[in-house]
Image (tube, grey):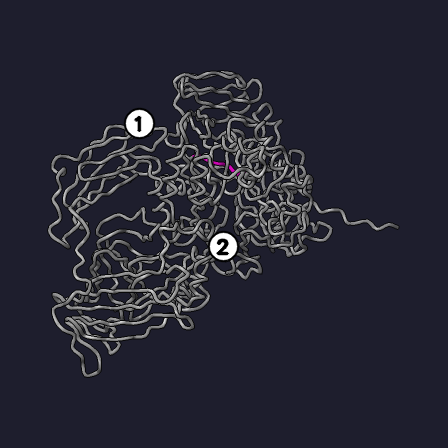
Amino acid sequence: MTPTGPVRAWFADVAPAHGSLPPRAHLDTDAASMTLDGEWAFRLLPRVPRHGGNGFEAPGFDDSAWDLVRVPHCWQLEGVPGLPRYSGPAYTNVVYPFPIDPPDVPDENPVGEYRRRMDLPDAPDGGRWLVRFEGVDSAYEVYLNGTRVGDAMGSRLTHEFDVTEYVVPRGNVLAMRVLQWSAGSYLEDQDMWWLSGIFRSASLLNRPAGGIDEVFVHADFDAAAHTGRLLVEAPPGAVVRLPELGIEVPANESLVVSDVEPWSAEVPRLYRGTVSTGAETVDLAVGFRTISIDDATLLANGVPLRLRGVNRHEWHPKAGRTLDEATMRADIELMKRHNVNAVRTSHYPPDARFLRLCDEYGLWVLDECDLETHGFERIGWRLNPSSEPVWREALLDRMRRTVERDKNHPCVIGWSLGNESGRGANLEAMAAWTRSRDPDRFIHYEGDWDSAYVDVYSRMYADHAETELIGRGEEPPTSDPQHDRRRRALPFILCEYAHAMGTGPGGLAEYADLFEAYPRLAGGFVWEWIDHGILQRAASGAYEGEEFFAYGGDFGEEVHDGNFVADGLLFPDRTASPGLAELAKAYEPLRIEPSRDGVTVTSLFGHRTTSGIDFRWRIEDDGEPVASGPLAVPDLGPGEAIRVPFPGRTGAPVAAAGPGGPQRWVTVSAHLAVDEPWAAAGHELAWGQARLDDHGEPPRGRARPAGDSRAVVQTDGGWELGPGRFDAFGTLVELSGLAVRGPRLDLWRAPTDNDERGDAPPSADWRALGLDRLRHRTVSVTSEDRALSVVAHVMPAGVDVGYEVEYRWHAHDGALRLDVFGSPLGSWAVPVPRLGVRMGIPSQLDAVAWVGLGPGEAYPDVSLAAREGRFASDVASLQTPRLRPQENGARRGVRKAELTGGGSRLTVSGECFILTVRPWTTEALDAAAHPTDLVPDPRWLWMNLDDEQHGIGTGACGPIELPRYRLEAKRFRLSVALSAEAG
């Protein structure tokens, strides 16, 4: 007898589903329905039962010993914060956490089994009953009353099953078996936590006889004629009604509608209506808008479109990919308040409610198919489903389900075939089907740069120089010459840029300038909206039991990508990071440029006037109010600009008095005049600043200035100079009775994620050189010219590279002035993390007030959001609690800082320095894996006063800092004055 192989299991079949219905739109209908969300019986098995069954689906099966869970959920997050109750989550960016052996998956394949009981809601006789699942990861089979209904794959896609012949009026038992791994998992390698379960809503739907199963709304806008074209595809005999427009017409008839207002992200005008038959009414929200391409420019309603966007994964630190509507609404409102106008649904269609909210609030949406095969890159793209014919139907099914569900949303302006899935004929087939089904939206895919079958040229992480070349149409040719001319006629989108991992992202200002300079550049989507941290509690240490956000590796995964999952503009609890403020400034819809005699206001809106926006001015001397008031700015149309004088009494500002006097700054800002759904009246949309006082180069005085008194040597070998006491090595140990440590030259910073990751991370060179283990040697301590001069060499062990530094102290008016002169030693082949000094100050000085740039942190290439003023904070609030601790919290352009507490005070003043104050050392910050690893020093705060820091860039995934932000080893001078009062 010839042996035969086993029958392939349904979940290792490339067929996307068995028994599920063709995809269709989600409709807001008056037909009977019932949610299946809520309490389900649940158990987890380590693998699929042998021969596929264990009887769990039988109505009489005893599930009384099973756990009860609330659906929707992700089973790996049951029990967190704390030990996961079932299996643990795992994070990978690219690599599959299982062997690449498509379409098969390992025997070690956790299985969740679910059961619940349900009665049918009241409904007319003669209809059908469907069960709908909006998101189940990764494959599942459905049973009703013991009968297998079907199975499906496509975790973030809706599937419906007809259960009419299986239901009874009362006591139905719905059972599901959900597998963590399936053939579909090869299509879902989307740089996120691998989580499983029924994670989106499920429902029971009645489909009445004579009802409306499908609707397709076409609503175009003719900008020249200011008319709309409406066609609603629906069953024959259905009637379309839009009362506001006086429309009552049969479905499937095209008509021209006069005097309609178009839909846009700036003015999301919706017309409410219905399409109905005698058996069912479906609510409509119609937005008239047209997306087109002309002369390599992407247009919306005939106007060039600038996508000021973000990539958005669905994430919650406790619920994973399960979001409620309140969270979605909060996200959209936060986006709107930070000038975001577009979302790419990376890398799958979102919860359907999110798109309805985008229609209402106004966001352009690039809707992405549930597809990524990035892990095949690791094996040279061999067997990649994008190019294997056997996978063709699976990929087409995913695209159909994306388009059919979401086609009626005016917010959706383009369809994305997926992400990082290589190249292949199956992608081309997806594009062809999409274009035939919906020719009114553009088609996007980044992974095939020749762009032969898409409508926009898309790239991720192209640097500024290459982006500018593309804007000019001067980019390198396509790999296939026959596609080159066509691609140069396509608009360009950065589908991912400005990777927001850790401190940063750097370079946003320069990208924003490029987008405005070149019509071909349609903008882009910053990666990404939110850190995917999972709420956990510290298991040990000083903060045992305290909550923190876990990342890859924190759950004992064999394969993981660490904190690469923490690369968002929001922290996991939806607190804004400093990067979001930077983005809001880069994405401002108005450019405000004040000067001494007035202000130029330029509208960057494309679809609205500035009506409903108030402008204000205020003048401050070193942050102290001088004058303020409203500013009359005429209404501007899209793209218009105007120069407006200040009111007469502010037109000739008085110069600041004398050298070292206060700086006078004017701030002009734009605010909502009325409430919007996403922000209250008074919300600031944009701002600009200019310095008004006479200012040239500040007087620097003598290169080696003298002071009031001489340094006097003490019996212990130390020194006394004015209010300062120094040890024998010339280190300041006391200032006016206040104990201090230092300052000493500091070249090291706790590497940022952008320093640590990427193709050539500088931190590797820094550590190899030894900049994290500097040694200090005092060369000389001398009293000369009424000053104390301390010369030291600061170098790592084992190398002849470092810095020679002179600390030149002199006393003046009860304070100590410090001039630091630094000169590089040896041949430097790497940039320097920072140039400045670090000193310890008493820990009770935990209140900080400063004049300079604020209120948030800033770095050389991350300083758009920093404005001139007077600010105050406690030391704890100066820290940015990133998931992996790293350099953070620097305040730039500081001219004066006061630290107070416990009756003591320390004042630092200077021409312009960078201030950082921490309750721990840089070394402790560098060593910590999570914020709960950081224990404040009980005695000291650690204050850095820097001349400059190395730029930030986005090198963790993208371009490094621009050359002008690279801090080379160079001579520098830092001058500050220190005074104190001891409590």
| Residue farthest to the front, as pictured | 827
Asked whether 872 or 225 is in front, the reply is: 225
| Residue farthest to the bottom, as pictured | 715
Mark 1 Cα shell of 10 Å, populated few (<14), some (14-19), many (≥20) = some
Q: Main secondary structure of the magenta part?
A: strand
Callout 2, which amino acid?
Answer: Asp
Callout 1, which amino acid?
Answer: Gly
Q: Which residue sits at x=21%, y=67%? A: 902
Quadrant where the C terminus sits is: bottom left
Q: Position of residue 249 (x, y in %)?
A: 49, 16
Q: Which residue sits at x=28%, y=30%? A: 641
Mark toward the start of the polypeptide (1 vs 2): 1
Estimate the spatial distance between the alpha carbons at disc 1 and disc 2, rounded to whole Å. 45 Å
Identify the element where label 2 is drawn. loop
Identify the element where label 1 is drawn. loop
Please provide the residue range marked out in magenta.
364-368
Q: Which residue sits at x=11%, y=37%? A: 649
556 to 691, vertically: above or below: below
Asked whether 390 or 262 is in front, the reply is: 390
Kindly indicate the quadrant of the structure image that contains residue 334: top left
Q: Where is residue 545 in the image (x, y as percent from the top left)?
A: 43, 64
Q: Where is residue 232 in the image (x, y as percent from the top left)?
A: 52, 22
752 sits left or right of 384 in the view: left
Kindly indicate the quadrant of the structure image that contains residue 700: bottom left
Which residue was labeled with disc 1? 637
24 sits left or right of 474 in the view: right
Mark 1 touches mark 2? (CB < 8 Å): no
Q: Where is residue 371 in the image (x, y as percent from the top left)?
A: 57, 42
Which residue was labeled with disc 2? 759
Mark 2 Cα shell of 10 Å, populated few (<14), some (14-19), many (≥20) = few
Is-magenta flag for residue 680? no
